[in-house]
Image (cartoon, rainbow, N blue to C red):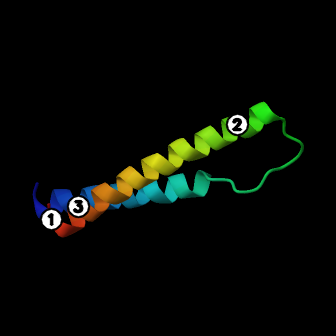
C-alpha cells in the first residue's frame, strides 16, 4: 500500500469513526420496555465492536504495518 493510499484509508477511517461515535445515543428518551432496552444494548455493543476494529486498523496503518 502506498503512502497516499494509506493516508486516504486513514482519512476514511477517521470519517467512519466520527460518524459511528456520533450515532451512539447515551440518552434514553421516553419509556422503554425490556425488548427495546435489549435491542438498544445489542446495537450499541455491535457498534462498539465495529469502532474497535476500525481503531485497530487505523493503528496498524499509522505504524505502517
Distance CA(mark 3)–CA(mark 2): 33 Å
Measuring from the top left, give residue 45's x and y in whole percent: 55, 45
Instruction: Locate the C terminus and report the quarter of the image it occupies.
Output: bottom left
Contact? badges 1 and 3 (CB < 8 Å): no
In the picture of the structure, the residue carrying the numbered disc 2 is 38
Contact? badges 3 and 2 (CB < 8 Å): no
Q: Is residue 36 above or below residue 56?
A: above
In the picture of the structure, the residue carrying the numbered disc 1 is 64
Q: Circle 2 sits in a helix, a strand or a loop, which is it?
A: helix
Distance CA(mark 1)–CA(mark 3): 6 Å
Measuring from the top left, give residue 24's x and y in whole percent: 62, 53
Q: Residue at x 33, y 61 (%)?
A: 11
Nearest the camera: 9 or 63? Answer: 63
Q: Would residue 32 appear left or right of 20 to someone viewing this image? A: right
Residue reaching furthest to the bottom: 63
Q: How many C-alpha atoms fall within 10 Å of the one at disc 2: few (<14), some, or many (≥20)? A: few
Q: Which mark is residue 60?
A: 3
Which mark sits nearer the N-terminus, 2 or 1? Answer: 2
Residue reaching furthest to the left: 2
Amino acid at each position: 500500500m502506498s503512502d497516499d493510499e494509506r493516508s486516504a484509508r486513514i482519512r476514511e477511517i477517521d470519517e467512519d469513526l466520527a460518524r459511528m461515535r456520533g450515532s451512539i445515543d447515551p440518552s434514553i428518551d421516553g419509556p422503554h420496555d425490556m425488548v427495546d432496552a435489549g435491542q438498544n444494548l445489542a446495537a450499541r455493543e455491535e457498534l462498539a465492536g465495529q469502532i474497535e476494529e476500525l481503531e485497530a486498523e487505523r493503528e496498524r496503518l499509522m505504524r505502517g504495518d
